[in-house]
Image (cartoon, rainbow, N blue to C red):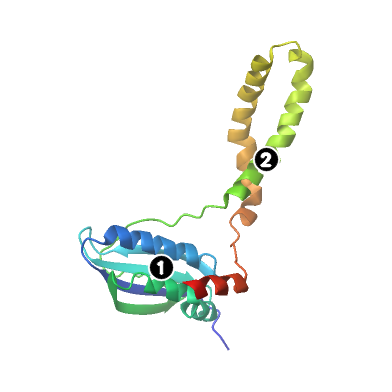
Amino acid sequence: MASSQSVTVSIARTVLPGYHRQFAAWAHAGQELAREWPGYLGSGWVRTAPESDEWHMLYRFADAESLKAWDGSPERRWWTESAAELMEITRVEHRTGIEGWFEKPGGVSVSMPETVVPPRWKQAVSIFLPFFPLSLLANFLLHPLIKEWPLPLSVLLTVCLLTPLMTYIFLPASIRLLRPWLHAARKLPRRQLASHYSRV
């Protein structure tokens, strides 16, 4: 029976001098690939010293089966092979449970936090949902008062009223309510993935 404990993998990689910017971009691309994978819980990387060539990469999955599926996937294989000439792997460790995030591989400094950004169309939906009814309500209430105003002035008043309401009240509420949907993992069909990697 597969373990239900989360698994954290720590991989020490030595990067060729002068290629650290390329390595950071490569590591970020790997995070973007992994975040789509079922069971992915998070990842990051640390450097043992500001001028060190050794980087420790951490990634965490919900269980051993999810990790095994990711480690054996064509996506990960393509990703690791794309930077094979920039570095070499010096150590790999697996830790179960939450303690994997807290055991530091020596003195380290965090290089870059992982950010999770929803697709732009989801961002647009989260803005549209509160803005449309709020705009209708504002026009309904203000129309009797400003119907004789020049159009630029009436639009200016509406925008000045709606902007702070959207910024401080309605948009934060919309994002809070839609958070599970906004940050849900995006999955490509397996057939599409297979077609893509067969061309790489």
Q: Give the answer, above or below, for where 81 lies relative to 173.
A: below
What whole-number distance in Å separates the C-alpha atoms at marks 1 and 2? 38 Å
Q: Position of residue 182 (x, y in %)?
A: 61, 53
Q: Quick one: label 1, few (<14), some, or many (20+) residues within 10 Å?
A: some
| Residue at mark 2 | 128
| Residue at mark 1 | 101
Q: Nearer the viewer, mark 1 or mark 2?
A: 2
Please indicate whether residue 85 sits to the left or right of residue 153 in the image: left
Q: Relative to the observer, which residue lies in front, 119 or 95? A: 119
Element on which disc 1 rests: helix
Please indicate whether residue 33 sits to the left or right of residue 122 in the image: left
Q: Quadrant of residue 18?
A: bottom left
Q: Relative to the observer, which residue lies in front, 87 or 49? A: 87
Q: Relative to the observer, which residue lies in front, 49 or 14? A: 14
Point 51% across, 75% down: residue: 198
Q: Quadrant of the N terminus?
A: bottom right
Q: Quick one: label 2, few (<14), some, or many (20+) residues within 10 Å?
A: some
Looking at the rendered structure, the kind of residue marked 1 is: Trp
Q: Quadrant of residue 133?
A: top right
Point 38% across, 74% down: residue: 81
Point 34% across, 79% down: residue: 92
Q: Give the answer, above or below, for where 34 lies relative to 126.
A: below
Q: Position of residue 3 (x, y in %)?
A: 54, 83
Q: Position of residue 4 (x, y in %)?
A: 56, 79
How many numbered discs, if any? 2
